[in-house]
Amino acid sequence: MYNEQNLAEILNTYKDSFNSAHWVKEGYKWEAVKHFQNNWDINAHDFKEMFLEATSKTNNLLASMNFYPRKMLEVLIDFDDEKVRSMFLNLYDESKDLLERVQDFKQSADDMKNQYSNDDWNNHYQNANVISTYLWLRFPDKYYIYKYSLIGKFAKKIGSNFKPKRGKLSAIIDSYSFLDEVKDYINYNFEMKSLLEKHMSEEHYDDPELNTLIIDFEHYTARYLDEVEPEWFPANYTPNISVEEWVDLIKNPDVFNDISLQIIKRFKDYGGIATCKQLSIKYGETPGFYNMGSTALSKRVVTETNCEVISDNEENSRWWPVLYVGKKASKEEAGTYVWKLRDELSDALDQVDLSDVELFVQASEETGNINYWWLNASPKVWSFSNIAVGESHFYTSRNENGNKRRIYQNFVDAKPGDMLIGYESNPVKQIVALLKVTDSTSEENLHFEKIEGLENPLDYSLIKSMSELQGMEYFSNPNGSLFKLSEGEYNFLLDMIRDVNPKQLYEIEPYGTEDFLDEVYISKEQFLALKELLKNKLNIILQGAPGVGKTFIAKRLAYAMMEQKDVSRIEFIQFHQNYSYEDFIMGYKPMGEGFELVNGIFYKFCMKAANNPNKSYFFIIDEINRGNMSKIFGELLMLIEKDYRNSKATLAYNGMSFSVPANVHLIGMMNTADRSLAMIDYALRRRFSFYEMSPGFDSDGFKRYQKSLDNETFDDLIGKITELNQEITKDKSLGRGFNVGHSFFCGQKICTEEWMRQVIEFDIIPMLNEYWFDDDTKVRKWENILRGVFDE
């Protein structure tokens, strides 16, 4: 049913293109299957949540421009989740006829659309293509994805007369039979399994029957071959040097000197296609080294063989086509021009032993002969976050069975002084730390010290998208623990890290007790008591009347305990009624067509504090009583207690252990005038110490401030405010928690009547109207008293 020669030629092209770049673009299909297999549960209590999670990696397979089958199925689930559950139960019942199951699913979707549709939507998008995708996700070793427009083009390109019937669900079954025949030929004639395994990781489905590979091959043939970039240049020139002649030239040291062999070996190692910039990053040397070295080599080849040279006005463009064909680099590729080894030269390199040729540039003596590595950690087993900065750890070169780990030679080659990138694999999938190999390293154990924990980790997806890093050893086969990095790759990664984790270049201002007392209007005894309370309890709440300076004091208390104004160790947030665990700890957030697990502000802050256990960190929460503590903290509510710091709990979303470090201090704030105070969660009361703050009009600091203004009207006004507070305190419906705070009257270097009038008219009087909303006489009385200060 097909032309074997056509199929073989296209398959060879597909194999050649099946490199890291292709895997970056198309590897999501294997990841989608693995994720679906791990998360599908037809009996899940929350069917909608399960379905969305199971299909969250499908990307454009279930969503694309003007095509929303996944979203519309979500809508149908909202109308009747049990009906949709039954549709999948039937579709996945392998005891029934396949065509009947497909037809039933489509008919059920039609029925639900007719029952529930409105003017907002008129298509459920559950067509043959989508139903076949559901079947493939559930049974990836048996079924394929069917798409009419692809299967027809694919069949035509491989010389087959097979053509499915448009609009017929039975076309799915016919296409399955056709693709089974293609798969049988490929399995018999070509070794594709090893090609696939080269790119596989733990997050990908291993595809034992190669059905997903066939889907990818079909898509490549039908789409990519039509989208091939302009022909490699020059299309009509060849040096006419055979494979045998290239072998002789490679062995001739007058033609291929040491530098030439290094260049050609690196091209071959990179996959035969690269820019000079990409080679520079992976193996070392400058891009010019590869550019000029290739030109020089080409001239020697021409001299030796007297082969024809392309006629071109530009001198340099005459020479490199002897070795390569080329084209302009895309926006995603590092460099300006891509070179590809000529086929005959590439084949000749397979026949020559280049093991003695240097692949990576050796570090000079000035750099201490440093090597660079990428170290994987499985966070469900161990995590870099559990290692403090400055702390040492080790990783064995053999697994628990005593067998050597993959790429064992890397463990042998690692030596003291080498630098490591610390990466945590699934489900974290981020670079989280920088490490250094220590003197204790041996062939059996890799000892390292954590030198920096990243406040803002680097996501795998971002790293993988960088064309400059496509040649990394880790990307070629991520199965393993320790992978080599070139100096260029390490520096490129370090630049990416510094973009989001800049080094602190400014000098931090010191801050001590006297600085605190100069700014905050409480006594030294009160300050020392407050400082000791926070130090011992770790969690305190500053409560008091409006305007007593709770926020101002909270930040300066943190400064005083750190003995410096290090704002990088302070985080400030405000709770509200809708604040949730997903905001605070972690939760799924919309990302494109799907959802992504995002770490919350407190989680990230704790990770930062854990990386620096010898320094104090302060998390300040304004309006803490307005949030639902149990809802916001979830399983971490217990862990904020002093006795449970550094104890671990399993997080609900990612299943990983987590602890609140002992160096994290929580400072909450709330107004005692807030009428919701009586409703404070008991959990909040039990885990925090409460410190009552009062107006500081009588403090030494405020008196110094008052004296510095040297304004009699201001002195009279403060006297009246003091009298007002006495009456508020005596009022049984209010009390001292409703006193007027001193901060309303602070922060001025020059005291003017205009400013004082503004404070009274727009701050104090509106507050009194709220306090005594049922006593107009008392409000009028104090309006007259306060306004009268300015009439005297």
Image: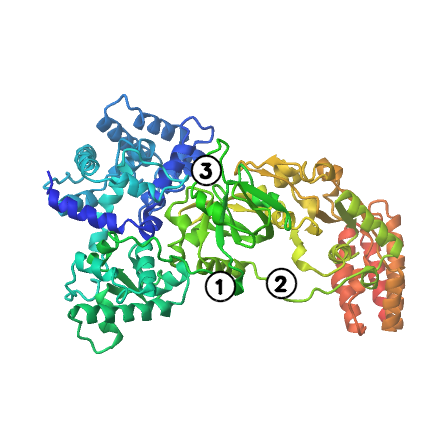
Residue 504 — which label? 2
User: First in sequence: mark 2 or mark 1?
Assistant: 1
108 to the left or right of 500:
left
Tell which circle, 3 or 2, labels the residue nearer the N-terminal end: 3
Determine which of the numbered discs, if any, sits on residue 364 in the image: 1
Quadrant of res 188: top left
Quarter assignment of residue 289:
bottom left
Report the residue marked by disc 3.
404
Q: Is residue 152 left or right of residue 117?
A: left
Which amino acid is tagged 2?
Gln
Where disc 2 sits, the SS reads loop
Q: Which of the two marks, 3 or 2, is nearer to us in this view?
A: 3
Q: Residue 326 got which mark?
A: none
The kind of residue on which mark 1 rests is: Ser
Q: Earlier in the sequence, mark 1 or mark 3?
A: 1
Q: Dot 2: few (<14), some (14–19), or many (≥20) neighbours within 10 Å?
A: few
Give how far across and how far down residue 139 sits, in percent: 31, 31
- Identify which residue is drawn at 65% across, 52% down: 573
- Can residue 607 be seen by looking at this rendering? yes
Measure how far apart labels 2 and 1 are at the Cα level. 29 Å
Residue 120 location (% of width, % of height): 36, 45
Helix, strand or loop under label 3:
loop
- Cα distance between the residues tagged 3 and 2: 41 Å
Q: Residue 219: x percent and y percent?
A: 24, 46
